Image: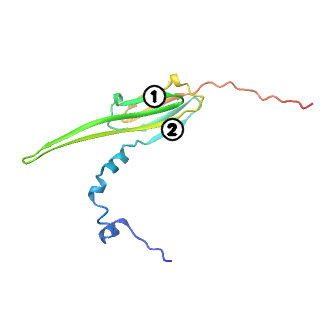
Amino acid sequence: MKLMKSSLPSLVNDGFLSGLLDDRFFDSDWMKRMQDVPAVNVVETEKEFEIEMAAPGLDKKDFNITVENGVLTISYEKENEAQEDKKNYMRREYNYSGFCRSFTLPENIKTDKVDARYENGVLKLMLPKTVEAKVKPKAIEVH
């Protein structure tokens, strides 16, 4: 079997995918929804977990953050309306966007002390850990 090098532009230009891919594909609702899922970084320190979520263009009031039964849920929902009046027609589009991300929390999180801040397009949550009692190992003698 021979391995052939190919590229997407050459396949499109050769007509193989021209019927499947065009500019409408990249402007489609599916591609827009893929862009709505925010990137998340989770960092663990000795005292807390920090969650950073890239969510530019939102307001802090847009977020809904809950902790229930050991699950942290971050979501938002936004409605936009665009209207265009031209000479022979009127176009009105409604766009609903949003996301929902959930995280199962470890048992050592102080859920009543979770704090959230939104600055410069980044949502940052601080989840402090409980102080765990350190148990000293004890040798057990076998009789």
Which disc number belongs to residue 42? 2
Q: Earlier in the sequence, mark 1 or mark 2?
A: 2
Regarding mark 2 in the picture, which secondary structure is present there? strand
Instruction: Give the quadrant of residue 21.
Output: bottom left
Q: Does residue 63 appear to the left or right of 130 in the view shown? A: left
Say which residue appears at 33% left-offset and 70% top-offset.
16
Q: Does residue 31 appear to the left or right of 47 in the view shown? A: left
Q: Nearer the viewer, residue 44 or 32?
A: 32
Q: Residue 108 in the image: x percent, y percent? A: 60, 28
Which disc number belongs to residue 66? 1
Q: Does residue 66 appear to the left or right of 47 in the view shown? A: left
Q: Residue 114 in the image: x percent, y percent? A: 49, 26
Position of the C terminus, as image quadrant, is top right
Instruction: Give the quadrant of residue 54.
Output: top left
Regarding mark 1 in the picture, which secondary structure is present there? strand
Instruction: Give the quadrant of residue 60.
Output: top left
